[in-house]
Amino acid sequence: MRRFLLPENREPFGQSSRQKSVAKPGLLRYCADMLADRIRAALLLFCISMTSLPLLAQQFVPKTITFSGDRQDTHGALLAVTGLKPGVAIGPANIQAATQKLSDTGMFAHVQFTFNGVDLHFVLTPEAGNLEPVRYVNFPWWSAADLTQAVAAKVPLFHGMVFPESQMQQQVADALTALVAARGVTATIRAVPSNNNAGQVAAVDFEITSPKVVVGAVHLQGSSAAFAAKIAKVEEAASGQPWNAAVQDQLQQALKAVYGEQGYLEANVAGLTHGAPQLSGDKLLVPVTATVSEGAQYYFAGLTLAGQPLPESVKALQHSPLHAGDVANEDLLRGLLLAIAQPYRAEGYLDAKVDAQPSLNRAQHTVAYTVTIAPGAVYHFHKLTITGLDPSQTAAVEKYWKIQPGDVFDGTYAAKLLLLNKKQLHNLDGWSADYKEFDNTTTHIVDLTMTFHKGGPLR
């Protein structure tokens, strides 16, 4: 705001009324001078505005263009985004456009610049949070590396990582949508942050949600005639399942179930490939081919319990359904391991892990197992919740529930409670129940919910 000063021989405003009447002629002169000052100021402002027009349109030649604040990208990559080049004339509009291009990458929360006519410097403030790797769930046309390269050609500064929920995340989804459309498929693509076991974001998964990408025809080659019927069932079950990176592991698990009960412990699936996806209605069918390697058939040679197992676990081993010379049936082995673990659950070791480490004699085609037990912490009971019954029925069940709050929790007790007291609980005839444990792995306490349903045997 312009400040106008009174001449020295004039009285300032704000004096008393007597002083005003004495100073009247001076006041008139002051008003005239003030008006003249305003006119001169307006003329000066007009002249300044007219001389500024060439400045706004003036071109500058930056000697250097530099960046700070971004450790992820190279100087060349950032410079390419701006479209500017040292030694090439630019104006204010060019600098503003370059600033906007950097902001539009979605990598930066703020973009600022300084320019002295020679050196242009951009100050970049990255988005909050951490860059997380991108995972492509079900894009059968490309490998992950090829797809990252294709997306990078469309999304500046993309290197296979994004800030979750950022503008770049949406740009990647848009680029994937365009790439899939180029294959003749109109797709809906979802981006979802994926958490690790600690509940922290560890990746961002991009997935085609429409059409549904599923396994088409499955052909498993290399199996013997003896397993042809069971392999056909595996192929049939796999067809129609979601197509993703887990397909080979799922086939492997299915084959282990088929071959494991016959002692083919090294049977595996290899060389999984998929053909060109075919659109069929609301599904994208991906045909799959893999080779089965059966390996040799093994026979059971023995099992040893390591450490100091509970006596009841030792008894379970004494009643093992596996005997030396038998086919090494993995189904029977799993049942035996469950029987070995049960005494630990009864003693409150709900996290007990029982592991059987095989030792293969490939010359003799025999296998011996060493079983180790990691008991974990002891859990204690906290609360029982019963749902689905009227008050009298609920009271009857609670009467026969013997574990009190604070007691060591018997993990086998709930499953046998109703059967042990079936005669006394005659008012529950025609009812069945489900059980659900809520184990707090931090405090090691257990809440149990029993949900009763009308119909079915009491169990």
Image (cartoon, helix red, strand yellow):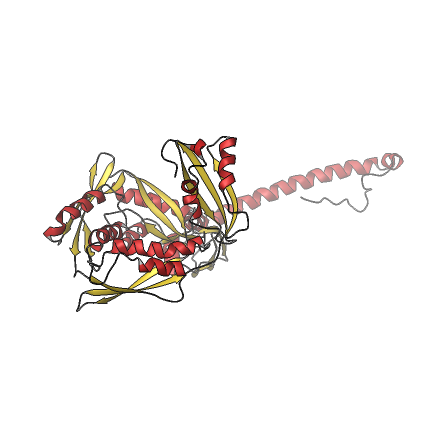
Q: Where is residue 143 shown, x and y percent of the image?
A: 25, 53
Question: In the displayed image of the protein, which residue is found farthest to the right?
Answer: 18
The answer to whether residue 181 is above or below residue 338 is above
The answer to whether residue 267 is above or below residue 45 is below
Q: Where is residue 334 shown, x and y percent of the image?
A: 30, 54
Query: Quick check: can you spot residue 184?
Result: no
Residue drawn at x 16%, y 54% as measured from the top left: 291
Query: Quick check: can you spot residue 318?
Result: yes
- Identify the image quadrant of residue 434: top left
Residue drawn at x 65%, y 39% as measured from the top left: 39
- Determine whether, in the image, residue 229 is placed left or right of residue 309: left
Q: 161 or 442, which lies in front? A: 442
- Determine whether, in the image, residue 4 is placed left or right of residue 56: right
Question: In the displayed image of the protein, which residue is found farthest to the front?
Answer: 423
Q: 64 or 232, which lies in front? A: 232
- Determine whether, in the image, residue 79 is placed left or right of residue 397: left
Q: 156 or 426, which lies in front? A: 426
Q: Where is residue 232 shown, x and y percent of the image?
A: 16, 45
Residue drawn at x 75%, y 37% as measured from the top left: 31
Q: In which quadrant will I find the N terminus? A: top right
Q: 245 or 125, which lies in front? A: 245
Residue drawn at x 16%, y 48% as measured from the top left: 231
